[in-house]
Amino acid sequence: MSKKIFDIIPPEKIEKDKKPAVKTFREKISEQEAVEEIKKKAKVIAAGEKIEKKGSKVGWVIVPLFLVSLIFLASQVSKAEIEIWPKTELITLETKLTIDVNTDEIDLSYKIIPAYVFEAQKTLYEEFDSTGKILKKAEGTIRLYNEYSTKSETWLKGTRFVSSEGKLFKSKDRIIVPGAELKDGKLIPRYVDVDVIAAEAGEDYNIEPTHFSIYVFRGTPRYTKFYGESLKSMTGGGDSFQVTEQDLELAEQALVKKAKSASENDLKSKTPEGQIFLEDILETEVLEKFSLTKAGDEAKKFSFKVKTKSKTLLFEKKDIENYVRQLVSLQRSSSELLHKESLKIHYTPQTIDFNAGKAVLDLNISVEVYSDISLNMLKRELMGKSLAGTKVFLENQPEIKEVKVEFWPFWVKNVPKDIEKININYSFINISI
């Protein structure tokens, strides 16, 4: 049988021919991973779009909030710093004033303010050089032996002894010479120590220990039986210092001057704070002055003592300031203030009576005055004004000479409307009388 020939392939065959081939395990895994990667990328893109949209929305909210917060903060910390220099006028006054220990308060009608006595004492000791000189005689001791008889003898003061070198010395006192002792038919000499002084002054008589004879017995048997020995050298001969009357006078003058100055300086340095000390109101007296050394005493140096007492009348600085303030108020407007640091007073004492406890003074006074300004009223006038407006307003005030205005922070353009944030530095107010 002949075969059939088809111009068109039957559908069943086509389907059979298209039947997919079986995939391997690796091919299946690769396809799955690719699908998962595509899903992840899709999620990231979607999340980014959401964040971008959300960020734009948040930005539109934060920026206005930040600006509002900044404005609020500026309103809370903003302030105006203002410094004022007032116009001043120098006035001068001349008046008399009595300071008196017998009053307790200022009496403007009698021009009296209280005072009190203030004292200080000083004692000085000082050593001075002697300027006088004398030529001294050497002195010493001779042991006098009696080998002549057993009888004691009395010799006169001034008995002369001559040394083996020919130096002559004299006894300073009367001499009781003991008799020699008789023992086994022999005379045993006995002795007495005699204080002697050289017959002449000078260093030549400062001789070493030596033998002495009795000058008056020369040429007689007694000359060798009475003799002396010095056991120590003679000393003290030669130049020596002596205190003179002029030494004592000069020492007194110098020490009195020094003690007075010391007590006055002590008085000044111990003046309590807030008290007025005037060097012209000062009295110093010498309480003691003496030296244990007398004119003619032999000494290279001598001491002198002086004790002094100084006193003054003190008065309080605040009292004189109040006195000046009351004095000025009688001649000027009561609204004017006195600039404390400009106050200058020259005091000239006319009479001083320490016994009565008072002194009369001439006063030359100079002080700057200025008008009082109400800072609270000024602050209220300035609230809300611009920088330029503030300066113009202040500079047009008749009581003000100069101003300086600053706002803080730098972007603030007007004076705060809160009076507590307006600071006015008007230093004269704090140092007014």
Image: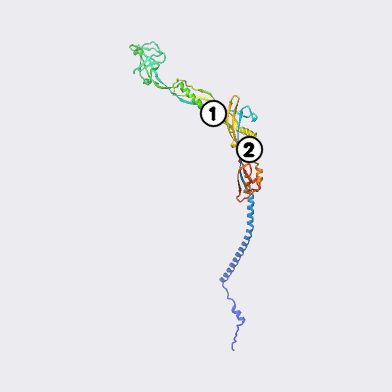
Residue 231 quadrant:
top left
Up/down of 406 relative to 288, above or below? below
Asked if residue 78 can be seen in this view, the reply is no
Residue 18, horizontal then vertical, whole percent: 59, 78
Residue 422, horizontal then vertical, whole percent: 64, 45
- Graded by Cα atoms within 10 Å as few (under 14), some (14 to 19) or many (20 or more), the crowding at tag 1 reads many
Name the residue tied to disc 1. Answer: 264
Quadrant containing the C terminus in the rendered view: top right
Direction top: furthest residue: 151
Viewer-proximal residue among 303 and 395 = 395
Up/down of 273 relative to 146, above or below? below
Viewer-proximal residue among 312 and 199 = 312
Direction bottom: furthest residue: 1
Quadrant containing the N terminus in the rendered view: bottom right
Asked if residue 49 can be seen in this view, the reply is yes
Up/down of 418 relative to 57, above or below? above
* Residue type highlighted by circle 2: Leu
Q: Which mark is residue 337?
A: 2
Mark 2 or mark 1, whichever is nearer to me: 2
Q: CA distance from mark 2 to mark 1?
A: 37 Å
- Graded by Cα atoms within 10 Å as few (under 14), some (14 to 19) or many (20 or more), the crowding at tag 2 reads many
State which tag comes first along the sequence, 2 or 1. Answer: 1
Viewer-proximal residue among 361 and 82 = 361
